[in-house]
Amino acid sequence: MQRSAVSVMSNIAEGFGRHRHREFLRFLSYSKGSAVELQSQLFVALDVGYISESTFEETFRVTEETIQLIGGLIRHLKRIRPPKKSPR
């Protein structure tokens, strides 16, 4: 679960650091996938008794909010045009 959570943030950072619109979108998609993976792992952790129902509910809510935010950023970036490269 920790790796999935860190992967969400790391993929956003890596995509942003690539300085390419298309690359950033691709890494945002990876980030969203990692957040969904974390939700899946939360269900497993709850089922085997590693976390309480209240911990599950709060963490799931935060991951759902994160997924929505990433999705909104992806939709926004798809609507805008990336800056054109200046001729050299």
Image (cartoon, rainbow, N blue to C red):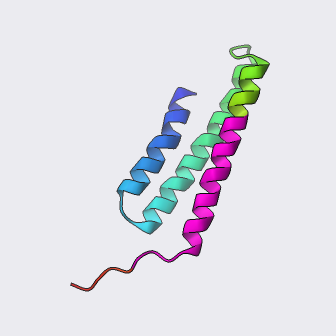
Name the quadrant containing residue 84: bottom left
Going 36% across and 55% down the picture, which residue do you hit? 17
Magenta stretch, residue numbers:
61-83
Going 39% across and 66% down the picture, which residue do you hit? 20
Q: Is residue 84 above or below residue 57?
A: below
The quarter of the picture where the C terminus appears is bottom left
Q: Is residue 2 above or below residue 84?
A: above
Name the quadrant containing residue 75: bottom right
Magenta segment includes 69: yes
Any part of residue 2 in sight: yes
Residue 47 percent location from the top left of the image = 77, 20
68 left or right of 12 in image: right
Disc tally is 0
Q: Is residue 82 above or below residue 28?
A: below
Q: Is residue 71 above or below residue 58?
A: below
Residue 86 percent location from the top left of the image = 29, 82
The quarter of the picture where the N terminus appears is top right
Residue placed furthest toward the bottom: 87
Magenta segment includes 29: no
Going 66% across and 38% down the picture, which residue do you hit? 63
